[in-house]
Amino acid sequence: SSPITVPALARKKSRGEKITMLTAYDYPTALLVDRAGVDVVLVGDSLVMEELGYDSTVPGTMEMMLHHIKAVRRGVAHALVAGDLPFLSYQVNADEAVRNAGRLLQEGGANAVKLEGGVAIAPTIRRVVDAGIPVIGHIGFTPQSVNQIGLQKQGKDAQGAEQVMQDARAVQEAGAFAIVLELIPDDLAARVTEELEIITIGIGAGPRCDGQVLVTSDLLGMRPERAAFKHVRQYAQIGAEIERALSAYREDVEAGRFP
Ligand code: KIV
Ligand code: NA
């Protein structure tokens, strides 16, 4: 079937069908996520933590993102490929944002970009959209601001909820076609979804969003040593299975059973 487009995602929402998004950072994972029929493959800057081992997404660079987006692009035939703009690639000014967003499409082969922030970043979103680049917003808990906001749910009190509502409206008004709602109360995510016309995609935001996103390595249980987040459902324990296979190989070689 033909590749998924931004208008096709909007039609999906208007038919009341749920939209699915998962991350991929490499070619083999991209092949599997695409084959699973997921609508949007996100090369999230979570790769800075999950794939490169840093303890936040703040060290992410354009070079890291492009390297991984190119690999994912080669593995995806059907899904829409979205790439995250890394920290400091769009916050300095709108000119840099347009240039860097454009690079994710022109060099990386992405179909859309995602960037974090609400009211404060809306004028930048407008400039990127006006350049012909589809934008996904991202509000609530925004990992690139972890040093400022800490690792916690957003929009919990009335004032926080009002900020989330204003951010959501600003992102829509600026021309984004979708918005990720991360770690906000279920009821607030439902309110945002009710009020906005664009697609809402939740993570740790309850079931009443237009779509859902998870970090693929989390749902696969890639890191057995790490306790699963509350918002994640583990569909496999791949990390433990890989560790078992690697140990079996080592034991076989040491015991003379392989080759
Ligand atoms: O970087 C990422 O993987 C993300 C998703 C969790 C939305 O931004
Ligand atoms: Na991200």
Image (cartoon, helix red, strand yellow):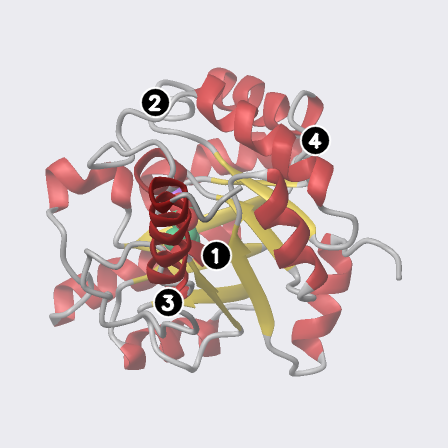
Ligand 2, by image quadrant, is: top left
Image depth: mark 3 or mark 2 in front: 3
Q: Position of residue 180 (x, y in %)?
A: 43, 57
What amino acid type is highlighted by mark number 3? Answer: Gln
Q: Is residue 226 visible?
A: yes
Amino acid type at mark 2 = Leu
Callout 2 secondary element: loop
Q: Amino acid at mark 4?
A: Gly
Question: Nearer the N terminus, badge 4 or badge 2?
Answer: 2
In this view, 232 is above or below 47: below
Residue 7 location in percent, x, y? Answer: 76, 58
Q: Give the side of residue 161 with respect to residue 29, left or right.
A: left
Please give the label number shown on residue 88.
2
Residue 6 drawn at (x, y percent): 71, 54
- Label 3 to label 2, Cα distance in Å? 35 Å
Vertical relation: 179 (above or below) 204: above
Residue with the mark numbered 4: 109
Q: In which quadrant will I find the N terminus?
A: bottom right
Tell me the quarter of the picture where residue 190 sits: bottom left
Dot 1 falls on a residue whose secondary structure is strand
Q: Is residue 102 left or right of residue 8?
A: left
**Mark 4 burial class by Cα count in 10 Å: few <14, some 14-19, many 20+:** many
The yes-or-no answer for disc 4 within 8 Å of ligand 1 is no
Query: Reading the chain from its start, which is encountered first: label 3 or label 1?
Result: 1
- Confirm if mark 1 falls within 8 A of ligand 1: no
Q: Which residue is mark 1?
A: 179
Label 3 sits on a secondary structure element that is loop
Distance, label 4 to label 1, CA atoms, is: 21 Å
What residue sits right under mark 3 in the picture? 237
Q: Earlier in the sequence, mark 3 or mark 2?
A: 2
